[in-house]
Amino acid sequence: MFVASFSLPPSIMRPLPQKRAGAPLRMLTAWLAAGASLLALFPVLRGGMALGATVPFWLVAAPAINLAWFTRDRIASTVVRALRRFRRPMAGQARRLQSRGRADRSSR
């Protein structure tokens, strides 16, 4: 399950070799897909009064949390890029509108 990076010894925190770096992500993605499929196909696994929500947690939520943790840098950079892209057209559009307004006034 999820283990915070500050609780791991420094020897484990060394970067993985490039050829093995994607193995945990592939395994977690397969776990998440299989868990979601099982929950969709077998409603009994969704839990009830006796099980609570432990089975859905371990089949779907746990691998999703782990994937988010392992890819947090990629997620953060994507969010920052999207925010920058979202802000940029607004400023350009405002400039275009101002320049059009000035051109219309000068031509009259």
Image (spheres, grey):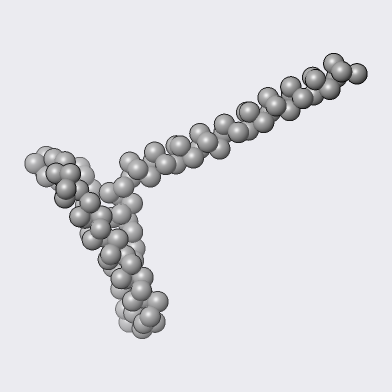
Q: Report whether 41 appears left or right of 87.
A: left
Q: Nearer the viewer, residue 77 or 2?
A: 77
Quick one: which residue is furthest to the front in this view? 107
> On the image, which quarter does residue 66 sit in?
bottom left
Q: Quadrant of the N terminus?
A: bottom left
Q: Residue shown at 31%/47% (left/top)?
A: 71
Q: Residue shown at 17%/44% (left/top)?
A: 18
Q: Report whether 30 appears left or right of 81.
A: left
Q: Report whether 5 appears left or right of 89.
A: left
Residue 100, percent across and down? 77, 25
> On the image, which quarter does residue 11 sit in?
top left
Residue 27, percent across and down? 23, 61
Q: Quadrant of the C terminus?
A: top right
Q: Nearer the viewer, residue 89 or 38?
A: 89
> On the image, which quarter does residue 40 sit in?
bottom left
Q: Residue shown at 33%/76% (left/top)?
A: 38
User: Can residue 105 be seen in the rendering of this structure?
Assistant: yes
Q: Nearer the viewer, residue 105 or 81?
A: 105
User: Can residue 57 be seen in the rendering of this structure?
Assistant: no
Q: Is residue 27 above or below residue 91?
A: below
Q: Report whether 21 appears left or right of 37.
A: left
Q: Is residue 89 above or below residue 41?
A: above
Quick one: which residue is furthest to the top in this view? 106
Quick one: which residue is furthest to the left in this view? 11
Q: Residue shown at 34%/63% (left/top)?
A: 61
Residue 87, percent across and down? 57, 33
